[in-house]
Each structure stands twice: as structure tokens, then as C-alpha cells.
Image (tube, rainbow, N blue to C red):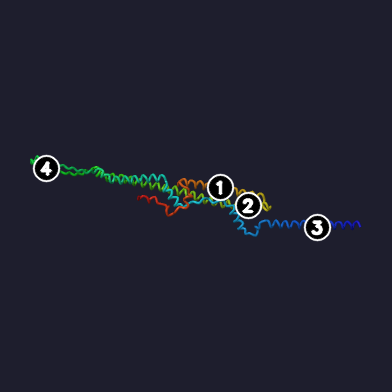
């Protein structure tokens, strides 16, 4: 009898323990199902869509665009202080040429006189009564003969002023083009570094999610974090370099590049330095 009681007691204990395990398992299953429903369904979404969404959210603002080169060069040519001074010198030289061409007329004088009375002639011993009218023109031979030489001197000065204007225009054009392409290269590098930085940010977010789920080790997460930090440093350095090049170009042309974005290309086309030579 004691043996039978012992066997029955063990059987009852096993049945009770099995019931407890079944109740615990049954209670955990609905909780897991509820958590699965609350968790976003990323498995059903395409991987490319998830990556594109994350990349778009992490993308930094794009750098400021540059206006067309033709607009920048023409604006700089029209507003360069050195060219403005040289234009005034050309205008003065042209005025000197025109004034020298007409200078010989300054020595021309016209005179007239008239008299009335008796006029004696001792040769023929005669006396005449009447009226005398005299008209005369005086011309300076020095001004008349030296006119061509003077005009030639001032004409050479005019041509020299035009050549200097052309040299200055070429210098301004060259400097603007160099600054423009330096800024353009810095902007392109900034865009490339921005894409790399955005990609590493997305990878870091995915790595952090995997680490929280326990599928990624601390070492791998640290490596991804380090790569992201280096990509961010390169991006910020490229963005600063572009800002400096952008500001230098604005100071060179004397206006904001943003104001030239909507400029009319038909009104602001690049003028060759030789185009103004005929003026």
C-alpha cells in the first residue's frame, strides 16, 4: 500500500506540472502574436524600398547650385572696377583724337574792315573819294601742318588704351573661369561625399537594429560606427571647401550667385575681349 500511494502521488504531481507548463505556454503565445502585430511589417516590404526610404530620410541638404558660366563671366566683365577705369581712359583718348582733328580751326581768324573818305596817290598825284572794304583770313601754318602728327599721337594712345582694356578683360575672364571651375569641382565632391555619408548612416541604423535584436556583435557595430564617423568628417570637410570656393567667387564678381540664377542668357552672353576693340 505505501508503494501504491507513492506511485499515485508522482503521477498526480506530473499531471499538475504539465498543466502549469501548458498554461504558461498558452499565455506567452498570444503575447508574442500581439508583439508581432505591433512590430512594423518590414519583412513583406521590398528591401530596395526600405533602403530608399531610409536613405531619403538621412540625406543632407544639397549644396547651393551654380549659375551658368556665361552669365557669371559676363556679369564680372560688366562690373569689374579695373575695366570700368580702363573704359573711361578709352573714352578720353577717343575724345582727344576727335578734338585734335578739329584743333586746326582754332587758329583760323576772319577779319573785315571798311573805310570811306578821300584816298591820295602820290605816284600819280591824284586824289580819289570813295569806300574801301577789306576781308582777311588768318591761318596758323603750325597748327595746319602739325595736325596730322598730333592726330597720329592721340590715335596711338587710343589704340594702346584699347589693347590694355583687352588685356584686363582677358585677365578678368580667366580669373572668373578658374574660380568658377574650382567651385564647381568642390560642389561635385560635396555631392559625392554626401551620398557616401547618407549610405553609411543607413548602414549604421540597420546595424543598430541588428544589435538590439542580438544578431550583431559589438565589434561589428563599432566598425560600422567608425566608418560612419569618417564619412561624416569627409562630407563636412567637402562642404566647407565648397562654401569657401562659393564665397570667393561671389566676392570676385561682386554680387550674390543666387541673384544670377534666373538671369536671361540672351541678355548676358559671354562677350569676347576683342568684341569691344572696334569701339
User: Residue 129 has which mark?
Assistant: 4
How much space separates mark 1 and mark 2, taking CA atoms?
Answer: 20 Å
What residue did someone put label 2 on? 205
Q: Residue furthest right?
A: 1
Q: Who comes first in sequence, dot 3 or dot 1?
A: 3
Left-right relation of 162 to 14: left
Indicate which label's residue lies in the foreground, 2 or 4: 4
Q: Nearer the viewer, residue 105 or 29?
A: 105
Q: Position of residue 156 (x, y in %)?
A: 32, 46
How much space separates mark 3 and mark 1, taking CA atoms?
Answer: 63 Å
Q: Secondary structure at mark 2?
A: helix
User: Residue 221 has which mark?
Assistant: none
Q: Nearer the viewer, residue 102 or 227?
A: 102
Q: Who comes first in sequence, dot 4 or dot 1?
A: 4
Residue neighbourhood size for the residue with mark 1, other residues' Cα within 10 Å, grouped as few (<14), some (14–19), many (≥20): some
Residue neighbourhood size for the residue with mark 3, other residues' Cα within 10 Å, grouped as few (<14), some (14–19), many (≥20): few
What residue did someone put label 3 on? 19
Amino acid at each position: 500500500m505505501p508503494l501504491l500511494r507513492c506511485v499515485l502521488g508522482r503521477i498526480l504531481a506530473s499531471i499538475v506540472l504539465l498543466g502549469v507548463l501548458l498554461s504558461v505556454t498558452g499565455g506567452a503565445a498570444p503575447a508574442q502574436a500581439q508583439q508581432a502585430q505591433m512590430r512594423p511589417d518590414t519583412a513583406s516590404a521590398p528591401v530596395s524600398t526600405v533602403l530608399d526610404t531610409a536613405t531619403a530620410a538621412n540625406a543632407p541638404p544639397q549644396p547651393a547650385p551654380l549659375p551658368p558660366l556665361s552669365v557669371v563671366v559676363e556679369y564680372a566683365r560688366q562690373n569689374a572696377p579695373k575695366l570700368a577705369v580702363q573704359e573711361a581712359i578709352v573714352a578720353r583718348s577717343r575724345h582727344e583724337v576727335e578734338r585734335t582733328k578739329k584743333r586746326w580751326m582754332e587758329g583760323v581768324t576772319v577779319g573785315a574792315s571798311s573805310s570811306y573818305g578821300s584816298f591820295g596817290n602820290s605816284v600819280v598825284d591824284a586824289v580819289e573819294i570813295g569806300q574801301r572794304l577789306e576781308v582777311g583770313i588768318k591761318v596758323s601754318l603750325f597748327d595746319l601742318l602739325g595736325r596730322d602728327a598730333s592726330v597720329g599721337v592721340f590715335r596711338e594712345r587710343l589704340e594702346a588704351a584699347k589693347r590694355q582694356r583687352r588685356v584686363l578683360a582677358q585677365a578678368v575672364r580667366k580669373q572668373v573661369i578658374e574660380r568658377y571651375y574650382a567651385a564647381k569641382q568642390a560642389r561635385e565632391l560635396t555631392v559625392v561625399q554626401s551620398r557616401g555619408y547618407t549610405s553609411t548612416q543607413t548602414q549604421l541604423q540597420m546595424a543598430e537594429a541588428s544589435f538590439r535584436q542580438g544578431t550583431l556583435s559589438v565589434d561589428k557595430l563599432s566598425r560600422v560606427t567608425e566608418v560612419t564617423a569618417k564619412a561624416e568628417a569627409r562630407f563636412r570637410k567637402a562642404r566647407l571647401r565648397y562654401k569657401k570656393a562659393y564665397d570667393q567667387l561671389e566676392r570676385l564678381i561682386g554680387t550674390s550667385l543666387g541673384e544670377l540664377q534666373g538671369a536671361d542668357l540672351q541678355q548676358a552672353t559671354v562677350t569676347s575681349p576683342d568684341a569691344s576693340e572696334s569701339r
